[in-house]
Amino acid sequence: MKRLSKWFYLGSIVGGEIGGIFLLVAAVILLVISGILSNFILNLTYAGTGALITSSLLILLGCTAILYGASIWYLLLYKAWAAIQDGKASTTPEKAVGYIFIPLFDLYWVFKAWYGLARDYNRYIARYGFKASKMREGLFLAFCILSICSAVLCIPIPFLQETYLGSVIGLASLVIFIITCNETIDKANYLLSLQATQLNG
């Protein structure tokens, strides 16, 4: 397996997610400014076909960018698990990615897929005596917890909507998300370099 390009993986994941969010926010702002959103909520007729088409295009592009970033994120997860397969890993790359798509079960599986990756990686390098820095398990655990909290806060709960808790958790989750992706690429590349050296040696 070839080394993972940090520019491609990190750029695609972060660029796709953040770019998609900005495009969706821009679409909502355009809808609000043009009065389309408020008229729709009040069940009034509205004019502004140009603004409606533009905002629809922004929404489509935003969703496409987010889906693209997410698909590369899943690909990174797959490749990271593939790098530590020696018959003793706690799951396979296929399961690590596939089970995330099971509704409700994914609330548990995200811990197995990401926090479990950090734990299995650390066991892997210890098993073979590699002198490498460990994955920060606490960071991956925090990412999983914040991801669940972000998902829960998307549910309309009246007393939470009046606070900035969702925004704070979302921002913290985004920062840790970027750090964990970066660390995953680095650690996977370390193992891939070792494996390539062993094959060539």
Image: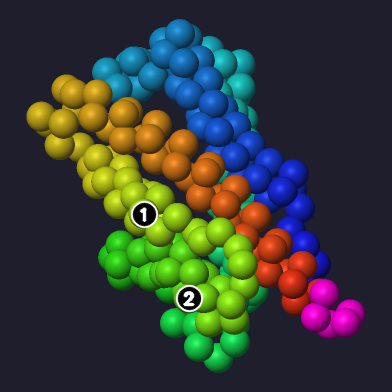
Mark 2–mark 1 CB contact (< 8 Å):
no
Q: Main secondary structure of the magenta part?
A: helix
Which residue lies at the image location 50% right of the left edge and 88% below the top edge? 88
Residue 54, placed above or below residue 61: above
Rendered view: 126 above or below 48: below
Question: Image quarter for residue 133?
Answer: bottom right
Q: Position of residue 1 (x, y in %)?
A: 77, 73
**Badge 2 element:** helix
The amino acid type of the residue labelled 2 equals: Arg
Mark closer to the chain start, 2 or 1: 2
Q: Which residue is mark 2?
A: 123
Quarter the C terminus occupies:
bottom right
| Residue 190, quarter of the rendered image | bottom right
Q: How far apart, in angstroms, are the residues tagged by discs 2 and 1?
A: 15 Å
The reply to whether residue 27 is in sight is no
Could you tell me residue 83's position as x and y percent? 64, 74
The crowd level at tag 2 (other Cα within 10 Å; few <14, some 14-19, many 20+) is: some
Q: Secondary structure at mark 1?
A: helix
Q: Which residues are magenta?
A: 197-201
- Res. 138 mark: 1
Left or right, residue 4 beside residue 83: right
Looking at the image, the residue that sits furthest to the right is 200
* Residue 200 is inside the magenta segment: yes
Q: Tell me what residue is drawn at x 74 percent, y 72 percent.
A: 194
